[in-house]
Amino acid sequence: MSEELVFQIALELIPGVGNRGTKQLMSYCGSATEVFKSTKSKLLKIPGVGGKMADAIKQASPFKEAEAIVQSAEKIGAEVLHYTNSKFPKRLKQAPDAPNIIYKKGAGELNPRRSIAVVGTRKATEYGKGITDKIITDLSALDVTIISGLAYGIDIQAHKASLKNNLPTIAILAGGLDRIYPSVHKKYAEEMQETGAIITESIPGTKPDPHLFPARNRIIAGMTDATIVVEAAAKGGALITANIADSYNRLVFAVPGDIGHTHSEGTNKLIATQRALIYTGVEDLIYHLNWDVNQVDEAPKIMPELSESEQTIFELLTESRAPLEIDLIAMKTQIPINQVASHLLSLEFKNLVKSMPGKKFGCLS
C-alpha cells in the first residue's frame, strides 16, 4: 500500500479543504505527505489557506479511514487513481471541478485517442434506440471510446451497441464500484471491463443515492471530446450533462426529434438555443472536431528523453493555444512552482519550449 496514496485520500477526508484547496496545497507542498508534514506557519503562507484550514489539517488524523478505503478498493479489484497519477483521465483533469480521486475497474484506457459521450433519456423510444445504434456503428471505424452512465434507456443502449461493435466503452457510476446500479445492467458492466472500464469518484460501499447522479454527470462531460444527446425531455440528467459539457467548452451535439413529443423537447431546445450543434450523422463529428480520418500514421519523431514532470508540462504547453505564465503552469500541472521553473529551463535546453515576455512560456513551433 502506497503511503502517498493513503495521505492523498486522507487529505480528501478533511472537512473544508475541498477539491481546489487540495490542489493548491499539493501544488505548493509537492505531495500530500508533505502537506501533513508541513508546519502551520508554512501552511499559512500558501494562498487561500487560512487559520481554520491549517488547524483542520494539523489536527486531523484520518489515516486509518484512508487505509481502510484503499483496502476496500483492493478487495474488489479496483485501482485508486489520484489526479497526479499518469493514468488519471487528462481530459477530466482540465475540468475546474474534477474529482481529485477516482476508482476504476477494467483494462480500458482512460486517455484514449478519441472519446465521445452518448447520453439521453431513461425512457428511450425505439427511434432513439435505433439512432443510438447507428451512431455507435458509424463510430466503430474511427477508434473512439464511448462513455455513458449505465442508466436505463439511451445510456445502456450506447454501452450495448459499443460492445456489439467491439468499441471500448466506459460507464461512469454514481455509487461505489461494488454497487452497480441498476443491478440488471451488472452483466454489461462486467463485460465492458475487458476492453473498457467502470469508474466512479465514490468510495467502495457508497450507495447510488439521487444526489450523486448530477455530480456523476460532470465526469461524463469532462472525460470526452464531445457529448451527443440522443433523446431528452425538458428536464433530466442528459441536459445536465450537456450543460456541464458546454461550460467546459466541449462540443455538444443533439439529435433533432419530432416537434411536440416529450422525448424531443430537451434536444430540440438545445439546438434552438444554440447550446448544441445539430447531429445528423458522423460527418458532423468529424467536421466540428476536425478529425483527420484519412491520416496515415507516420514514423514517430525523435524526442529527447523527458522526465514525467517535464512530459506533463510539455503536453500542457502543446495543448494550450497561447503561452502560459509559470504560476498557471504550476497550478494546472500540480507541480511545485520551484520545480516548474527548473523543468522549464531543462525543456528550453532541449529546444522544446521557449520563454516569452511577461514570464510566459510556450512550445516551439
Image (spheres, rainbow, N blue to C red):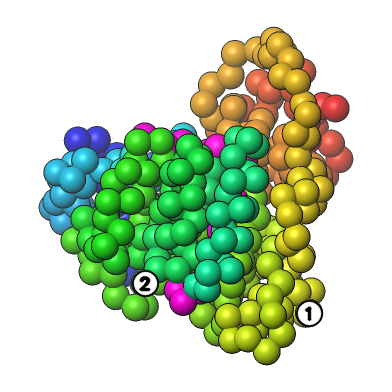
- The residue carrying mark 1 is 272
- The residue carrying mark 2 is 212
- Report whether 123 appears left or right of 266: left
Of pointers 2 and 1, the one earlier in the residue sequence: 2
Asked if one can make out residue 14 in the rendered structure from this viewpoint, the answer is no
- Report whether 36 appears left or right of 49: left
| Quadrant for the C terminus in the image | top right
Q: Give the range drawn in magenta.
A: 107-123
- The extreme bottom residue here reads 260
Query: Does residue 132 sit above or below 52 in this rendering?
Result: above
Nearer to me, 309 or 155: 155
* Mark number, residue 242: none
- Identified at 40% across, 68% down, the residue is 152
Under mark 1, the amino acid is: Ala
Nearer to me, 126 or 325: 126
Nearer to me, 27 or 250: 250
Residue 120: within the magenta? Answer: yes
Q: Residue 330 location, x and y as percent? A: 59, 44
Nearer to me, 240 or 134: 134
Query: Does residue 51 sit above or below 82 in this rendering?
Result: below
For discs 2 and 1, the disc positioned in front in the rendered view:
1
